[in-house]
């Protein structure tokens, strides 16, 4: 199959374009993996502080409301049932 692709000049261009995209993607993946593997705790905390702010009580957004008790559900709330979702695979 490869020899038929490389038979025309456009096929050669497509081959090298695909090879370049795969190479660039692989290099960027490896650089990101290497960079994030060697982060210290302080660097991770600084990165979190770049994207998220603490409120006046000193909590991040995901730390403010941790109460998920059933008493907080309103009486008239619609019940979530798994059957309500899309029926994938069941035509």
Image (tube, rainbow, N blue to C red):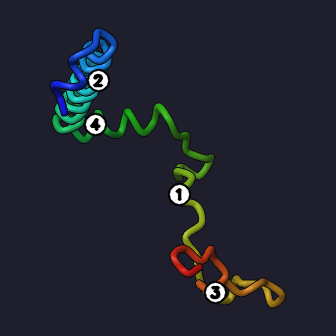
Q: Which residue is mark 4?
A: 42
Q: Which residue is mark 1?
A: 62
Q: Give the Cα distance between marks 4 and 1.
A: 20 Å
Q: Which residue is mark 3?
A: 81
User: How packed is label 4: few (under 14 Cα within 10 Å), some, or many (20 or more)?
Assistant: few
Choose mark 2 or mark 1, whichever is in front: 2
- The image shows residue 62 at horizontal and vertical percentages of 53, 57
- Counting residues from the start of the chain, the first of labels 2 and 1 encountered is 2
- Counting residues from the start of the chain, the first of labels 2 and 4 encountered is 2
Q: Residue drawn at (50%, 35%), measured in percent from left and top? A: 51
Q: Give the Cα distance between marks 1 and 3.
A: 25 Å
Choose mark 2 or mark 4, whichever is in front: 2
Q: Are marks 2 and 4 in contact (CB under 8 Å)?
A: no
- The image shows residue 4 at horizontal and vertical percentages of 21, 25
Towards the viewer: 42 or 79: 79
User: How packed is label 3: few (under 14 Cα within 10 Å), some, or many (20 or more)?
Assistant: few
């Amino acid at each position: 199959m490869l020899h038929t692709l490389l038979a025309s000049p456009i096929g050669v261009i497509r081959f090298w374009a695909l090879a370049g995209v795969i190479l660039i993607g692989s290099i960027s993946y490896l650089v990101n993996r290497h960079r994030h593997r060697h982060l210290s705790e302080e660097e991770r905390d600084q990165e979190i502080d770049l994207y998220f702010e603490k409120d006046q009580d000193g909590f991040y957004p995901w730390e403010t409301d941790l109460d998920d008790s059933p008493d907080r559900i309103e009486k008239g709330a619609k019940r979530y049932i798994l059957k309500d979702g899309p029926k994938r695979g069941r035509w």
